[in-house]
Structures are given as C-alpha cells and as structure tokens.
Image (cartoon, rainbow, N blue to C red):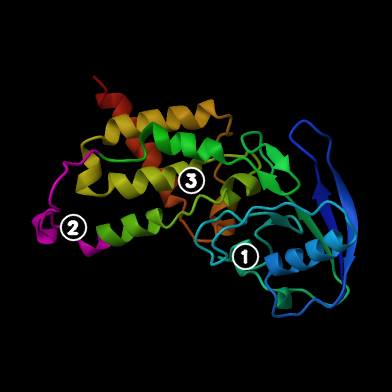
Amino acid sequence: MKLYLKIWRQFDTSSKGEMVDYEIDNVSEHMSFLEMLDLLNESLIHKKERVIEFDHDCREGICGQCGIMIDGRAHGPLKNTTTCQLHMRSFKDGDTIYIEPFRAKAFPVLRDLKIDRSAFDKIITAGGFIGASTGQAPEANSIPISYETAEASFDAAACIGCGACVATCKNASAALFTGAKITHLALLPQGKIEASKRVLTMVQQMDAEGFGNCSDTRACEIECPQGVSILSIAKMNAEYTKALIFRK
C-alpha cells in the first residue's frame, strides 16, 4: 500500500508544533501501525532526517504506552484495540492518515508523538496501593470473595493507564482511570481499611494535576482499549461521598 501521512512534529514541550506531510510506500497490510512508523523512520534515517519519536514498550497491547490519536480517535478506528495491536489492514491503499499525540493539559508533549503521563503516576502514588503485613502469604481461602465481586474488581484492574480516556474526553477528565484504580481496591477486603483515605487523596491529586471534570459523555468508555466501564466512575463518586460523610 501507499499511504499519505500527516504527522504532528514538535521538537520539545516549549516549541511550536505542526503537522508535516509524508508519503510511504510498500506498506504491508500485515504490519502493525507501529511497524509502519518504524518503516517510515528507516526512510528518514536514510535521508539523514530526524526520526519521528513515539512511545512504545511491549507491543502486545498490555502496557498502554503506544497510545496516539489516529484520524481523531484514540488508538485508531478499532474498538478495544491499542495502537500497537492495530494493523494496516484496517486502512486502504491511498488513504490519508492523521497522526497526533494525546492532547491534554496534564499530558504535555515531550517530542512529536511522545507525551508525559507522569500525572497518572502521581495519582497512583497518592493512594493506589494497600498496606499489607510482610511474611508468608495468607491462605487463599481465608478471605472469601464472591465470584461476582472478584470479576468486577478484575474488570476495573484491567486499566492499563494508556490515557485514551483523557485524550478522548472533551474535558480531558481522568475520572475513568482514577475510578478504575479506586474501584478495583475498594471492592476487595484488602482495600477496605484504607478506602476512605485512598479515595480522598487520589481524587485530590487528580484535581491538582489539572484534569477536567467528568460530564458523563461516555466517550472514555468507548475508546478504552480494555473496555473499562464507567461504573468505575460511579463507584469512585460513591466512595468519595461516603468518605466525606464519615471523615473524622
């Protein structure tokens, strides 16, 4: 395939960026989207031009680092698919593809398609953990958890922190990410001891990082590659209200 690419180029956070046109030929439909960018970068190296920088790690749809906007959609046109797992058979010969970084005040562009997601790390650091005694692991059957509760917790824990929810939200809200991290611990016995402190500190940190408010458009749920439900946001709000009421 031959493709026409319009890619956001920006040297650093303080520089002004712009869309730059590229043409690429001999693209196999079996290539992943990132492999297509690798092929383009090889041609740029041969021309002694600066390569296009983008984040990636596992390339298996697990880590979430690869997230970019493709034709205005986070991770591209396929549902529940990360950018690295998107293949070029989803496009046609002669297509023009717009490629941009995730855009949000809390996700400053570092260079080209690379963004700074450390705001998510700060939210996790604020309370996304549990205190546990060291030593031998307890007997698994000593803490009974229903199947339904375990599955609901696992569904929330599936969030990979890619930032697609923020990038696709008109308010750049991190409510789905934060809600997922709060929900998966709040549902389990191990997370209940610190539940009130956790939700208060994590929501406070989310606001401090400059994310917007949730207005329940559900765009985050639609674009989430792991299909995390907005019920996590409802659970976060319920936990937050309860923590405020019973706060000492």
Q: Is residue 193 above or below residue 135?
A: above
Label 2 amino acid? Ile
Q: How much space separates mark 3 and mark 1, taking CA atoms?
A: 20 Å
Residue pointed to by mark 2? 145
**Sooner in the amino-acid sequence: mark 1 or mark 2:** 1
Q: Residue at x 57, y 58 (%)?
A: 57
**Sooner in the amino-acid sequence: mark 2 or mark 3:** 2
Residue pointed to by mark 3? 177
Q: Is residue 203 above or below residue 27?
A: above
Where is residue 39 shown, x and y percent of the image?
78, 68
**Sooner in the amino-acid sequence: mark 3 or mark 1:** 1
Residue pointed to by mark 1? 84
Left or right? Give the position of 75 relative to 137: right
Left or right? Give the position of 228 relative to 106: left
Where is residue 101 shown, x and y percent of the image?
71, 48
Left or right? Give the position of 192 relative to 48: left
- Neighbor class of circle 2 (other Cα within 10 Å; few <14, some 14-19, many 20+) is some
Q: Quadrant of residue 130?
A: top left
Where is residue 33 shown, x and y percent of the image?
70, 67
* Residue 5 visible in the shown view: no
- Neighbor class of circle 3 (other Cα within 10 Å; few <14, some 14-19, many 20+) is many
Label 3 amino acid? Phe
Left or right? Give the position of 233 relative to 28: left
Q: Which residues are magenta?
A: 131-148
